[in-house]
Amino acid sequence: MRIAILALTEKGCELAEKISAGTGGQIFIKGRDFERMKNFVEEIFTKFDALIFICAAGIAVRMIAPHIVNKLSDPAVIVIDERGRNVISLLSGHVGGANDLTLKISAQIGANPVITTATDVEEKISADNFTARLGLLPEPKDAIKAINTAILRGEEIFLTAGNVRLNLTPKNLICGIGCKRGVSAEKISRAVNDACQMINQPAERIKFFATVDIKRDEKGLIDFVQNFGREIKFFTAAELAEKIFEYKLAESDFVKKNIGVGNVCEAAALNCVARAKFALPKTKFDEVTVALIWEC
């Protein structure tokens, strides 16, 4: 999950640093420049998996209101007061993962988690919660509501079709890879499998791989992909640079010095689809970096 942290006050910025250390979130906004924040939220709303506002809840609501579209595609939105007393799951609690992230941050900073979704309050798992964890897209939205209501009433839910049908479509998993020159196919295979285990998904879920075009002759990578039985897509440094700018991706100075851009695995994966959510941001393994994204 890629996380953007936005803070307004000096005390809020101090808390942002602490939360960033625990979640890997990127801090972008500092200071009481509301117009700047408004424009920035518009720019990043669909580019990050989660937005954390350290400010009054009303400010956060006004910032995100023009951009809310659908519970199946909107990012998780969390609001935290500047003293870190309450962590509020505001938007996309289930599919977006705001509830789980709220609990994680609350435990990290010793705050009170505020979660208001009915199934969570009643300590029941919802249809959109468990499907999100399995990498499935639940549709239509009306069926999610009907099934969650039945769960709250204590009714039995069956996998076979009944009066309400919820279609569960497996989402495409794309794997972006960066690697050192001369790395073996075995190391790449180990890194990809370890990455998939980190999100509790079998590597077989991967639809295709992606990397930078200067790796077209990388024997270990080509051998791995051929043995895996999937396609690999190659993108130019210029194409990767566009995604780095669009998604505000973090860059490695060392990689940038060698190939012209400082982020390969995340940027390459994002070039494969029109819309995406991160299953696993850039993660370093032995001579290999891996990023996993879900196509939305």
Image (spheres, rainbow, N blue to C red):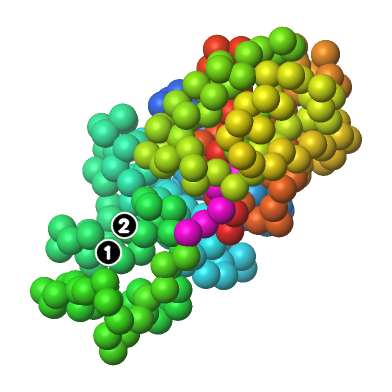
From the image, tell me which residue sits under label 2.
130
> Which residues lie in the magenta part?
170-174
Circles 1 and 2: CB atoms closer than 8 Å: yes
Compared with residue 166, is residue 210 higher up or lower down, i.e. above or below?
above
- Between marks 1 and 2 in the image, the one whose residue lies nearer the viewer: 2
Q: Residue at x 28, y 55 (%)?
A: 115
Nearest the camera: 206 or 36? 206
State the image quarter where residue 284 is shown: top right
- Examine the rendering and report whether any part of residue 157 can be seen: yes
- Outermost residue on the left side: it is 154
Q: Amino acid at mark 1?
A: Ser
The numbered dot on residue 285 is none
In the picture, measured across the screen, residue 295 lies left or right of residue 198, that is right
Nearest the camera: 246 or 168? 168
From the image, tell me which residue sits under label 1.
126
The prevailing secondary structure element of the residues shown in magenta is strand
In the picture, measured across the screen, residue 263 lies left or right of residue 61, that is right
